[in-house]
Amino acid sequence: MRRTVKGEVIASTFDRPSDEHTQVAELAIEKAKRMVEAGEDVVIILDGITRLSRAYNLAAPATGRIMSGGIDAGALYPPKKFFGAARNIEEGGSLTILATALVETNSRMDEAIFEEFKGTGNMELRLDRRLAERRIYPAIDVDASSTRHEELLFDRKQLQMVWKLRRVLSGLAADGNAAPGLELLIDRLKSFKTNDEFLSEIAKQPTA
């Protein structure tokens, strides 16, 4: 990965102790903060916030306050601090953090961790296991994915087009199966060079 990624890879493998996982994460975020203070724009891709929270649950001193799923309430503070470090600072750079979270694992702890972080980010991208099993990539559940304050990213006309696209894809979903809509979306996207061209074509389509 270090040879193929245009960026710095900081890792701690799954067979290492929990305290090593937490130390590596803390070193990475502190380095990122210093780079931001120096005026650089930094992006951290964390895989993932669930496993980091589990590591803190094992490594951090117990507070005695146990939440649903058996996770110590104090164990969630460090990963929240990590995730909350993302910001755009005046007279400096910016820090963007993209973190994965495990859902639908039949683990009460994983669900409790997800609920703690749900709604704290500016964007949520939900992946669909059923799409991945059918080898449809990117395996994105469009209905469940969203960007907070998306009206700031588009003008009014473009926003109406995006909403129309969502309605079309939702209408194509049968019994919760998003595959037909996503396959059509991927196929149509290949026919256009820009998002504007694609959205303009969507605007021409009649609404059911």
Image (tube, grey):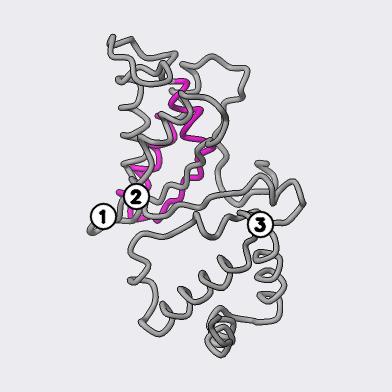
Quadrant location of the N terminus?
top right
Whether residue 97 is visible, yes or no, is: yes
Quadrant location of the C terminus?
bottom right
- Principal SS element in the magenta part? helix
Going 48% across and 42% down the picture, which residue do you hit? 99
Direction from residue 201 to residue 65 in the image, left or right: left
Q: Which SS class for mark 3?
A: loop
Residue at numbered disc 1: 89
Badge 1 or badge 3: first in the primary sequence: 1
* Residue numbers of the magenta segment: 26-55
Q: Reply yes or no: does residue 196 show up in magenta.
A: no
Question: Identity of the amino acid at label 3?
Answer: Pro
Whether residue 30 is visible, yes or no, is: no
Residue at numbered disc 2: 36
The single residue placed furthest to the right in the displayed view is: 134
Quarter of image, res 149 = bottom left
Direction from residue 82 to residue 197 in the image, left or right: right
Question: Identity of the amino acid at label 2?
Answer: Val
